[in-house]
Amino acid sequence: MTSVKPSSTSIRTENAKIVKVQLTEEGGPKDVYELKQGQGNSIQFAVMLLSNVAMTETGQNHMLGSDKKTKGSIIENLCGMFTYFRNSEMFDFVANILANVSSLKAGRQWMIENSKNVLSPLFLLLQDPELSKHRRKHLIETLRNVLFEWEKYEKDFLQMDVVELLCRYLIREHGLTENSLPESFERMYGIATK
């Protein structure tokens, strides 16, 4: 499993750009996000910095935390802000952080075990038709990563109605109509009524 690396398809190009930076003397140059001049504020700068930190396994471990009392508090707080400010560009790069932390096994497990505060709100946010393409792309990556733990956490996933949420998302995303769906999809909360 790999982390989300900066690429021209995953960047919000209106306010950020990708630059090559030599992070250490030993390593080669790395692509990182950098806000364009005059485009950001301190919150956006901080979130972008955390997004860049979360690209490495060490950074992902730091974001997750190791102390039992505070483990996951950074991720939980970012997730809360991400869902509360659902249409604010300031928090778009939280989606990158979530995708990167979920590429770590311990990150996936923590997200599932704390699904009430982390995954459930993210799954619901994925249903929002107003969600930006950037957020949607990286939330799907987060979901993909988390589903690698299906066998161990199947009960938790079934309790969260992940299969139904994914079906509703796919129906809406692909523009399927009530005439093209089987009878069994009738209960999809008004999306596919017959």
Image (tube, grey):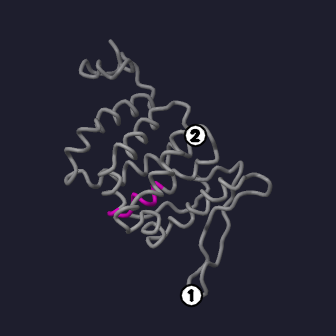
Above or below, 21 against 27 in this view is above
Q: Nearer the viewer, residue 105 or 80?
A: 80
- The residue labelled by disc 1 is 26
| Amino acid residing under circle 2 | Phe
Q: Quadrant of residue 51?
A: bottom right
Mark 2 surroundings within 10 Å by alpha-carbon count, few (fewer than 14), some (14 through 19), many (20 or more): few
The residue at the point 60 percent across, 83 percent down is: 24
Left or right: residue 156 versus residue 49 is left
Please provide percent x and percent y for residue 187.
29, 20
In the rendered image, the quadrant that contains the C terminus is top left
Name the disc covering residue 85, or none.
2
* Residue at (68% x, 62% y) in the render: 34
For badge 1, the amino acid type reads Glu
Magenta stretch prevailing secondary structure: helix
Q: Which mark is residue 122?
A: none
**125 to 58, vertically: above or below:** above
Secondary structure beneath dot 1 equals: loop
Q: Position of residue 136 (x, y in %)?
A: 50, 42
